[in-house]
Image (cartoon, rainbow, N blue to C red):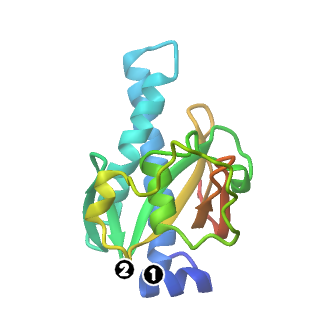
Amino acid sequence: MGSASEWARETFGDLAGELADILPACLVRAHERARTGHEGVHTQTLEAYGHGLYAVQYEELVSGMAGLGEAVRLQGRTMMLVRGQLIYPLRYAKRNVPVTTARLRRATGFRADLIRRHGPTPRQQILDLDWGDLDDSELHPDLETLPDDVQLVLVPYACSMERGVMHIEWGSAELRREDRYLIWHQHEPLSVGE
């Protein structure tokens, strides 16, 4: 069983080491399934791979963590809630770049709302840049089903069809609205294994 940091033990207790092993294995299996799907449809674009990876990452995580937590449905996907922590995978890059480069495509929508509502308290004051159309009072409806005290643990990973899973971390981050970058409060690598 993998070694777990102090943060991981504080977050997941005695399950930390087991989760440190399970999460990378699940994401590697998700990549393999997505690659197989892409090869099966013989498309010239990577569309089948990308959509497949998005779908199967959740399935593999739920399968791998069965019995360790509670399955919850959000945005049409089943995700795992382990000891009050929602595990959320996030492919942040197609190349092996630092997780500190991670940013969301949009400042609104399910992911953004999830991070704002269940991620850590922002460290900086929000700049008033008159965003106008961004209204925090209108959260994604699925988030109403999660208790307010649920915390978000992001599992960001870099992965491509050609190179597979190159880098995985876990941690907590806030979302900087003005440029959509994730500001990490805590992040640490997980061993991809070979």
Q: Position of residue 113 (x, y in %)?
A: 45, 55
Element on which disc 2 rests: loop
Q: Is residue 18 above or below residue 182?
A: below
- Towards the viewer: 171 or 147: 147
Q: Is residue 88 above or below residue 172?
A: above
Q: Mark 1 vs mark 2: which is more N-terminal?
A: 1
Q: Marks 2 and 1: in contact by CB < 8 Å?
A: yes
Q: Position of residue 35 (x, y in %)?
A: 46, 32
Q: Position of residue 24 (x, y in %)?
A: 51, 58
Element on which disc 1 rests: helix
Q: Position of residue 2 (x, y in %)?
A: 54, 75
Which residue sits at x=41%, y=57%?
Answer: 137
- Towards the viewer: 63 or 126: 126
Residue 33 makes an appearance in the image: yes
Which residue sits at x=32%, y=50%?
Answer: 59
Quarter assignment of residue 6: bottom right
Which residue sits at x=66%, y=62%?
Answer: 126
Q: What's under tag 2, amino acid-wise?
A: Arg
Q: Residues within 10 Å of mark 1 (few under 14, many from 20)?
A: some
Q: Is residue 168 above or below residue 148?
A: above
What residue did someone put label 1 on?
Answer: 12
Asked whether, in this view, residue 9 is left or right of residue 189, the answer is left
Asked whether, in this view, residue 46 is left or right of residue 191, the answer is left
Which residue sits at x=56%, y=32%?
Answer: 161
Quarter assignment of residue 100: bottom right
What residue did someone put label 2 on?
Answer: 83
The answer for how far apart the CA atoms under marks 1 and 2 are is 6 Å
